[in-house]
Amino acid sequence: MKKDITNRADIELLINSFYEKVKKDPLIAFFFTEIVPVNWAAHLPVMYGFWENILFYSGTYEGNPMAKHKDIHQKCPMKMEHFQRWTSLFTETVEELFEGEKAELAKQRAMSIATVMQIKMFS
């Protein structure tokens, strides 16, 4: 039986595992390598804080993900299939590593975030 997401270390495992998949993904990796080459040492801690705040209301994230993604969209339009792949990889990673209330919440929030971004970008 897998455990639930209970702390920052679990979030770090989730996010690190997820982005390892993203970096290799033929559909979306180029956003992170070519469109906006990511400094992973800087980006990953921001993502840990973002998801820690999403799941535990920690206040560890300050930022505007919508604005950052709109900037990326201006450089290279994101399509529905990009969002679908992102949510698929995220959900797959959660399910491989965890189960429980917070794991379900993480999957729900990822879907909600992707949906809101699509609505704002495509309308």
Image: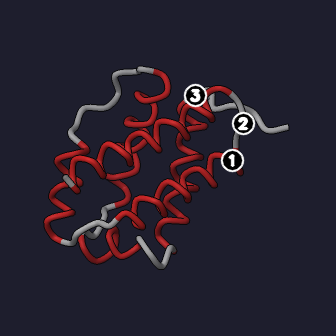
Residue at 40 percent of width and 27 percent of height: 53
Q: What percent of the width, then of the height, locates residue 92?
A: 63, 54
* Label pair 1/2, CB-CB below 8 angstroms: yes
- Label 3 sits on what residue type? Asn
Query: What numbered label is drawn on residue 7?
Result: 3
Q: What percent of the width, then of the height, locates residue 113?
A: 38, 42
Q: What percent of the width, then of the height, locates residue 70?
A: 18, 55
Cα separation, mark 1 vs mark 2, equals 6 Å
Count of marks overlaid on the render = 3
Q: Is residue 68 above or below residue 116?
A: below
- Label 2 sits on what residue type? Glu
Give the SS element for disc 3: loop
Given this view, does label 3 or label 1 mark the residue nearer the observer?
Answer: 1
Residue at 42 percent of width and 20 percent of height: 57
Give the SS element for disc 2: loop
Residue at 14 percent of width and 65 percent of height: 74
* Label pair 3/2, CB-CB below 8 angstroms: no
Horizontally, is 117 left or right of 29 in the view? left
Query: What numbered label is drawn on residue 99?
Result: 2
Residue at 15 percent of width and 70 percent of height: 75
Q: Which residue is mark 1?
A: 95
Q: Is residue 100 above or below residue 15?
A: above
Horizontally, is 65 left or right of 108 in the view? left
**Other-residue count near label 3 (Cα within 10 Å), few / some / many at <14 / 14–19 / ≥20:** few
User: Which residue is situated farthest in the right direction here?
Assistant: 1
First reached walking from the N terminus: tag 3 or tag 2 = 3
Cα separation, mark 3 vs mark 1, equals 17 Å
